Image (cartoon, rainbow, N blue to C red):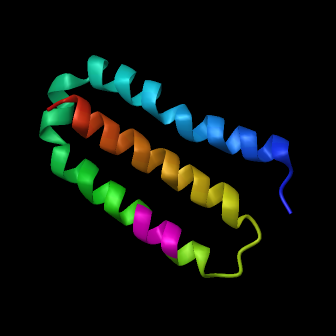
Amino acid sequence: MLSTTSNLLYALLLLAGFPTAWILAKLCNDEIKAWKKRFIIMAISSLIIAIIIFFTNFEYKLPVIMTLFFAIITLLTIIWKTH
């Protein structure tokens, strides 16, 4: 079972996706417009991979899923911020 400390660290990791995306959206505005469809594809594929890993018997399941959700949050925030 996970401890409270690791749960807090995972929550902070997911919340860190928002400021990371805001900084990237501000720095790379032109590149984001050209890569918008690819970002959507990467976010969808990250979600599919997270779902697949959830149903497998993988030792580091939770850290990998949290990392994929960090990528999803970052990518979708970048797309939303450039609208």
Residue depicted at 33% across the width and 62% down the height? 44
Q: Hey, which residue is sitting farthest front in the picture?
A: 4
Relative to 72, say whether 53 is above or below: below
Residue 13 magenta-drawn?
no
Query: Residue 75, percent across and down?
Result: 35, 43
Q: Which residues are magenta?
A: 47-51
Q: Quadrant of the C terminus?
A: top left
Percent coordinates x, y for residue 57 in the rendering? 71, 81
Q: Residue 21: image x %, image y %?
A: 38, 30
Q: Is 3 displayed left or right of 48 in the figure?
A: right
Q: Is residue 78 left or right of residue 68?
A: left
Q: Is residue 17 above or below residue 10?
A: above
The number of numbered badges drawn on the structure is 0
Tell me: residue 34, above or below residue 64: above
The residue depicted at 64 percent of the width and 35 percent of the height is 12
Occupied quadrant, residue 31: top left
Magenta-drawn stretch contains 50: yes
At x 48% / y 35%, what residue is drawn? 17
Residue found 59% across the figure and 60% down from its top: 65
Q: Main secondary structure of the magenta part?
A: helix
Q: Is residue 35 left or right of residue 2?
A: left
Rendered location of residue 36, percent (x, y): 18, 44
The N terminus: image quadrant: bottom right
